[in-house]
Image (tube, rainbow, N blue to C red):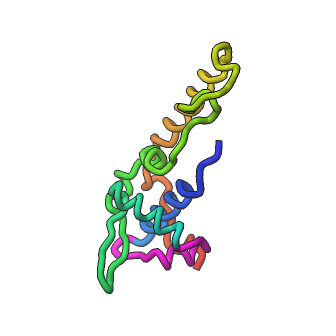
Amino acid sequence: MRLTNFSDFAFRVLLFAAARPGRLITIDEIAETFDVSRAHLTKVVNTLTQTGYLKAYRGRSGGLALGKSPTDINLGDVLRATEPDFALVECMRSENHCVLTRACKLRGPMERALAAFQAELSRYTLADILLSETEFPS
């Protein structure tokens, strides 16, 4: 299993914001730090804002800040909000064309593995993985 870059950057943006409590951050600042496209980050930030994980402040001195306390940001919830597809194998997809589906016994173990993965991430909050501002590249 591999997460999309979208989910990867969602976690990074939240870590970045959490390392700067009390001050607003900008998409340009995040893009420069992680050397990633501003356009891609804008999409990530929009999703994080819509789901309440970030709060956006408009205006000349605007920016972004965490929308919730790090202790209230569950990593499993963030993943479910940002990852579009958890179909690990074809038979887990809505458009399943696998010829083995009727007899195959792979789906059950894959579903349990995915559930275990999500359950493990759900045990942690952003507060559990915080970094200090100095741990980010400058």
Residue 26 drawn at (x, y percent)? 43, 77
Q: Looking at the image, which residue sits at the far bottom?
A: 60
Residue at position x 30%, y 77% in the image: 58
Q: Looking at the image, which residue sits at the far top?
A: 103
Instruction: Decide if residue 96 is on the left or right side of residue 99.
Output: left
Instruction: Decide if residue 112 is on the left or right side of residue 54.
Output: right
Q: Give the range drawn in magenta.
A: 21-38
Q: Which of 75 and 87 is in front in this view?
A: 87
Location of the C terminus (image quadrant): bottom right
Residue at position x 53%, y 54% in the image: 7
Q: In which quarter of the image is residue 95?
A: top right
Q: In which quarter of the image is residue 53?
A: bottom left
In reply to whether residue 74 is colored magenta, the answer given is no
Residue 51 drawn at (x, y percent)? 35, 54
Q: Is residue 97 above or below residue 27?
A: above
Residue at position x 65%, y 41% in the image: 1
